[in-house]
Amino acid sequence: MLKMPKEYQTIKEIVGPLMVIDEVEDVKYEELVEIELQTGEKRRGRVLEVDRNRALVQLFEGSGGMNLQRTRVRFLGRPLELGVSTDMIGRIFDGLGKPIDGGPKIIPEKMLDINGIPINPVSRDYPDEFIQTGISTIDGLNTLVRGQKLPIFSAAGLPHNEVAAQIARQATVPGSDEKFAVVFAAMGITFEEARFFIDNLVETGAIDRSVLFINLADDPVIERIATPRIALTCAEYLAFEQDKHVLVILTDMTNYAEALRETSAARKEIPGRRGYPGYLYTDLSTIYERAGRIKGREGSITQIPILTMPEDDITHPIPDLTGYITEGQIILSRDLFKRGIEPPINVVPSLSRLKDRGIGEGKTREDHADTMNQLYAAYTSGIQARELAVILGETALSDVDKAFAQFAETFDKKYINQGYKNNRSIIETLDLGWELLQLIPRQELKRIRFEFLEKYLAEDKKDKKDKKGVK
Amino acid sequence: MKAGRVVKVSGPLVEAEGMEHANIYDVVHISRHNLIGEIIEMRGDVASIQVYEETTGIGPGDPVVTTGEPLSVELGPGLLEMMFDGIQRPLDAVRLVTGDFLERGANVAKLDREKKWYFTPAVSVGDEVSEGDVIGTVQETPVIIHKILVPHGISGTVTDIKEGEFTVTDDICILDHKIPLQMMQKWPVRKSRGYKRKLDPTEPLLTGQRVIDTFFPVTKGGTAAIPGPFGSGKTIIQHQLAKWADAEIVVYVGCGERGNEMTSVLKEFPELKDPHTGETLMKRTVLIANTSNMPVAAREASIYTGITIAEYYRDMGYSVAIMADSTSRWAEALREMSGRLEEMPGDEGFPAYLSSRIAGFYERAGKVVCNGKDDRIGAITVIGAVSPPGGDISEPVTQATLRIVKVFWGLDYALSYARHFPAINWLNSYSLYQAKVDEWMNKYVDPDFSKNRQFAMNLLQDEAKLQEIVRLVGRDTLSEEDQLKLEAAKSIREDFLQQNAFHETDTFNSYEKQNKILKLVIEFYRQGKKALESGVYLKEIETLPVREKISRAKFIPENQMEQIDEIHRELIDSFRRLTEMAGVENA
């Protein structure tokens, strides 16, 4: 039997997003709190700490207008939960899971704790199914697989939304016509950015298989701490109980981390780097680790978190700790963006840790791994040669270096710069790779197995093996 | 036992009053969920407890009962091939109880109580035995004979000894008619297991990784650290070492890292063959998994659980390697608990005792003479990954680690961006075992080994200096000899140092193969230099077709190594022809 929640009017202090309530009894850690203002308005919070008969509560929706004497507080005996149902698909919710699209209330099939429960590592199934995003720099070089968490590291003024939207629009698993369900969580982004995503989903009809949770820049800040967890709870339900393949887009994780810092500062905790709490790593991991596959279950959760690096600085704690948890990162470059290259993905520092299991014969093509390594090596050599040419002039380059410099130039223009509307198949991407490798002398193609050189390199190149490079 | 009561909950830290009968470091059970925690501080009758499970729903008034025992592991047959959580709960048994998700309070036995093992006695009635003596053996896996040892502090005369199938808790031996011994024993994780004396570690640990074995070797019983920013390949190096190192037992601790990484180990190891035994890798491996989203306090314990299991196998006389990925997450767990205890912070919020804890952990490595009559020799090699924020190694965890470990493999962003893997920077990495290992290598691999190694390293160092000049004034200004040096150094980097972990042949190289390839790339420089002196043009040397073969030597399988000798001969021939032709032209 449920106990009747006792009501308290013993609020001791309200400071920032925190409230201290005295003389409480039987309060549990992480318990959901309902706060009723003197005006009758109801808000929610959760217990952050309970010390004897004093509870520290975090307010999700701000403290504006609360009166210490007249506001009433109830402890609900359960953590913050989300009522989930397949009817959520195609709907739009606020950051705490209330519908805001004017549609009917959701009748939950189940109530789930938004904090989720860690997946037993023994139960995890290793992600190895190739996802074709239609973007060469991802498919060819930083391959995404089902169940991976691959963030986009962006910065102010870069087109991360276009890239994320392109992935959401184009992502498929070759050989299966099943589409991804999209769960979209917006944390502190602007109305325009949210609108861009919604319009994109509407345009392609993807809205009918999407669930959106929107916390805009002027919505309550602390609510953002709950938003990704709410979205992932919904995603877990769809993936692991309804057998759907779910693509989760979380934007912008920087706003999330700032909300966390605000709470931490209000609690006067000892700060870690740049004022972020020492437990930022652990906290982020409880979000990112909720991606994956489970043995014996059909569905999967693939996560694309987006974050904007303050001052384009990858060593800033938010991208840094994210990179330590996620399985790689896609990095956007201001330099490429300014040169008009779309999408401006900087492949050199980008990485997908799970690519090796998702590529090769039977998945993409046998030559994928070798050409990938070779394209990378050639591109970095090309960039170095290009830098050298800037300082010393092109004449100072050796023939081989000239070939590499030319390769890098063509790579930028053809391979990376494909445009936001261009959906390339993996075979097109791989063939394009070989086309570009023609620019390099054969003896420099050290990363590619002999048999693949024979098979995939254009005819005229094979005979010249004893001659040296291009003119 | 009298129960205390919870008075405060703050994340993984719980305070309970009425605990005056409990001891520091006792394991306690909290609330009806039966959560496991450990007492870390006492003030009067109030105990501060770090809880190894989620504390959601715990509140004042919940009962706390002490077990009166410190956090311990159960040691005996059945450790190998298992994956445990940070406090040694077997995760597949937990899965049977709680399903695919890790619910709290799963109460499962650490070692399987049902499974029967065939015990073969090694002593007979009337034998005198004492601490560390082997009373019998169990074939735990096809490659590992598990020795059952007389536990700490026990000695006597054998009055009964059995043979046959027993569970780990059955009595298999009786001393002095009154002391029964079982195959299982317990040991508190925070205390190191004893030994007779430590030895100087001189024998290298073969890892099959060229840059490590040749340039920065670690010894059996040594310590090494791998600091590096994310994406620089720490985990892949740790996995490579766990796969190919010639340790007899491998303990892999995934401490606060990705869930999928542990899954990948669990998927790959039962499929991969150990080159040293021919059996699968899993047959000699113990896995400890505390992924980043699992409770933070158990992360702190996982490192100790791992090293205690390693010590147990060392005591049997095995050479054990333990990989901890990543010690930074463990240090962060310490920091989080310290912060909640409101301790005065040291550097970057880490507790003042950070470096002594790190030192204490690494000092449990070493080559030792084990307890017991037969003077067995066992060794533990500890290899710790460090994840410095932003890749900046001046931070406290890396610095405290470097003060204690003897080998430093510094990973580098620039190398990983160029897809040069393993991204170990040869200019700043070091191994303090070098001198000792050189002696061993010269004796067992090649008398010229240390000379060649030093020669190659000098070329790499010269290259770094020459590159600076090239960046300023261009390559053409260098003498032909220096340009040849650059070519040779490039060959060392690309044809020797780079190693593809995902290539079936390249992933592991024996000492013999490493030595042959090293000699090959050096020979190119030596011959090239001679040829230059006798009037051959640099261009001709650079474009020799045999160079493509040199670059592919690493992909030659171990059983066809004569092909490398053939390339070596072809190299010498090519240069002879070049020199002859130059001689004709000059004449």
Image (cartoon, grey):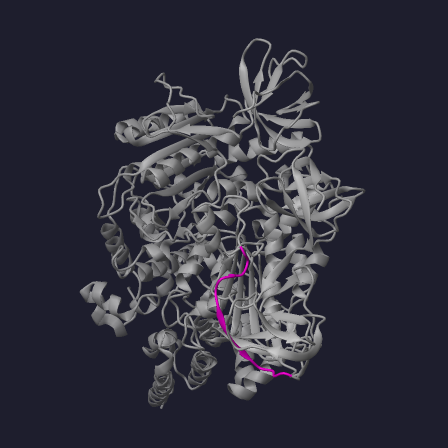
Residue stretch rendered in magenta on the structure:
B109-125
* Residue sitting nearer the eye, B583 or B467: B467
Residue B275 position in % (x across, y down): 42, 76
On the image, the x and y values in percent for residue B29 come to 63, 46
**Where, quadrant-wise, is the C terminus of chain B in this rendering?**
bottom left
User: Outermost residue, right direction?
Assistant: B44
Along the viewing direction, whichever of B571 and B266 lies nearer the viewer: B266
Q: Position of residue B363 (x, y in %)?
A: 68, 66
Task: Point out the residue furthest to the front here.
Answer: B177
Rendered position, B1 above or below B454: above
Corner quadrant of residue A301? top left
B440 w.r.t. B254: above or below: below
- Horizontal side of residue B92 vs A457, given as left or right: right
Residue at screen point 73% across, 53% down: B353
Residue A234 visible in the displayed image: yes
Q: Is residue B14 left or right of residue A149?
A: right
Residue at image position (57%, 29%) is: A31
> Who is closer to the viewer here, A403 or A322?
A322
Farthest top residue in view: A39
State whether residue A340 appears in this view.
Answer: no
Q: Is residue B161 magenta?
A: no
Residue shown at 65%/28% (left/top)? A56
Look at the magenta stretch and give its main secondary structure: loop
